Each structure stands twice: as C-alpha cells, then as structure tokens.
Image: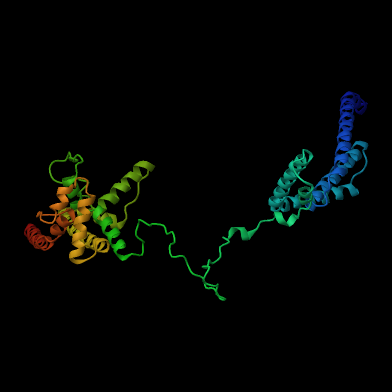
Amino acid sequence: MEGNSVVAEDAPAFAKLLAGLQEKAREVMGRTKLLAERLTELPTSEGVSLLQVKVHSYLSYLSHLVLYMLLKANGAKIEGHATIDSLIELRTVLEKIKPIELKLKYQIDKLVKAAITADEGAQSIGNGATSSKDDNDTEAIDPLMYRPNPAALVDDTTDTHDNHDPPSKDPKYKPPRVAPMPYIDTPPSTNKAYKLSQRAKEHAAKSRIIRDLRSQFDDRPEEASTEGTGYARKDTMTEWDHEWNEREKFEEDHFVRLNLTRKDKSQRKQLQKSGGMGRFQDEFENLDRDFDSLSSLNKAVQASEEETFGRGLLGRKNKRVASALFSADAGDADVDGLSNKRMKYKDVNEYVSSTSKQHDRKGRFEKRVRRFVGGGKKGGK
C-alpha cells in the first residue's frame, strides 16, 4: 500500500520529466541531422586524428551512458554488465587524451588559423579576387609545416665577401669588431679593492668619529642629547648593553622572563663591582676600533682612487680636475685656479687621513690613563 501511494505521488512529476525528455530528444535529433549533413561536406582526413578519437570517444561514452540510464529505469540488474566496463574504459581514454591535447595545442591552433585563412580565401575566390592556382595551393596543405621551427630562432647570417676577393674554401669564423656590451656601473665583487672599500665602509658606519665628522660638515640639523653635554647614552653603549636591551625588549613583547646564564651573571656582577670603570675602559677600546676603521677606510679610499684616476702625478692631476668638474659649486674660475690654490685640507678624505695619524699620540695618552686607573684601584684596595 505504501509503495502504491509513493508511485501515485511521483507519477505526475515523472510524466512531466518524461515529456521534457522527449522534447529534448527531438531537438537533439534535429541538430544531429544538421551536423551529419555538414560533416559530409567537411573533409577530416587532413585533420588531427587525436581530435577524431576524442569526438568518437565522447559519442560512445554518451551512448553507453544512455543505455545505463535505460537499464536503471527498467530496474534491470547492472552488476557485471558490459556497459559498465565500456564506461570505465571510455572514461580512462578521455582522461588520457587531455595531456596529449595540451602537447598538441600549438599545432591545433595553427591548423585552426589556417582553416580560417582558407575560408577567407575561398570567399575572395567567389568574388573573383584570387585565381584557381591560389585555390589549389590552399587545398594542398602539409600538416608538418605548422610545427615549431627551431631554425627560425637562429639568425640566417653568412660571411660577406668583397666582389674582388673569392670566398675561401675553409672559411673561419670572424667575430665582429664592434659588439654591443652592457655598461656595468658597480665594480665586480671579485675586485680586491672593492671588497676592501666595502668592508671599510661597514666598519666606518659604526664609528663614532665618522658620525662626529658628518654632523660637523653636514648641513642637516644637529641632534642634541637630553642627558647633558658629551656623548649621549646610545653613543657610549657597548655590545653587552645592546644585547641586554634586546633581551628586555623580547621579555616585554612576549610577557616572559628569561633566565640568566652564568656568563650573563658574571658580566653583570663584574660591571657592578667596577662601578662604571669598565665602561670607561670600553671607551678607549672603542677609540682604538674607531681609529683602526679610519685607517682601513683611508687605505680603501686610496686604493679606489688609484684604480680610478691612476698613480703618481698624473693620478693626482686627474683627481683634481674631476673634483673640480663634478662639484656642484665649481666654476671656470675654480678650475683655472685649482692648481695654484693652497688649502689646509683639499677634501674630507685628506682630513680623515691626517686625523688618523694621531693614533700614536692617542696610544701614549691611553697608556697613561690606564696606568693612572690601575694605580687608583690599587690605592683603593
């Protein structure tokens, strides 16, 4: 009884679906007849066989799919039926065709383009624009002519000879005398002078003396410290101070407390015992590093100038002329009077070079201060 009631409820909906299916079937039949008539007029022997296999596979797949639906509608047993095996086989073939079709995409596009061109040529033939010879040429199309031609990527250039000179039997390759070459502004990384100058610039960027010279000769406003005269706290910070600041910043950002190692505890205890004298000694070590960086920077600048302008008297002359021509405030009077002009320092490089010569005097002063500090410690004990 329940089954009959369900059938009675689904019967009107099934009747509507069946009527719609019949209408769609008639429409498909009409379009299929038109396509069949057109296929008889279109020769496919010169086409791509893969596309024919694809179309026939799709048609067979749809036919077996309709048969499968018919079996399901009649309530027949489909287990072990030959239609299931055919559907699986056709589905596998269609999936394998996809990557092959992608590889042949270039050739297929060329053939489609040639077909469109042939259709346009046929229309022009109907209008009397072309001759029968052109029509025969368009019909005889070799499919291999649409494949990629690697020879087209190579320049078809041959050695040219004069009319009077006969060509030699064994011609040798002669490279052109004028060849375009890119201009590389930055020196190569393998250059020893370039590596030295880059290393010196990195060390000099951290030097406090270089910062003082920049603030003295630069037009930018000078930064004043709120901690009084002398250097600011950030200028006198040691490497251990930077590490401690990074440690505190990490603890504040992540809301955790890091444990101190034995090395950190010993450094902190040593700094507390020295009462700031360790920081005072670090100042002299920083001065040593500053003067060493200035010396290396001076050597790097000299090596770079020798490579650019040359050595000796000619190099110095080229350097003076270049500095006069490329300076923003240089004029004709400056260039004329450049050789007779006597200045205490010609440029910042010479000033830095003269400043670095005071390293020996600074070393003797440092020894006296350390001796005085050491004596004060002994007296305090």
Image location of residue 275, percent across then percent down:
15, 51
Quadrant of the drawing holding the N terminus: top right
Name the residue rendered at 26%, 59% in the picture. 200
Q: Quadrant of residue 365?
A: bottom left
Image location of residue 299, percent across then percent down:
22, 63
The image shows a total of numbered marks equal to 0
Image location of residue 225, percent across then percent down:
18, 40
Quadrant of the drawing holding the C terminus: bottom left
Q: Nearer the viewer, residue 370 or 97?
A: 97
Name the residue rendered at 34%, 59% in the picture. 187
Image location of residue 137, percent across then percent down:
76, 51
67 vs 262, left or right, is right
Q: Is residue 92 something one can see in this rendering?
A: no
Q: Nearer the viewer, residue 159 or 268?
A: 159
Compared to residue 381, the image places residue 16 above or below, namely above
Name the residue rendered at 22%, 51% in the picture. 325
Compared to residue 328, the image places residue 301 above or below, namely below
365 vs 201, left or right, is left
Which residue ends up furthest to the bottom in the rendered image? 169
202 vs 138, left or right, is left
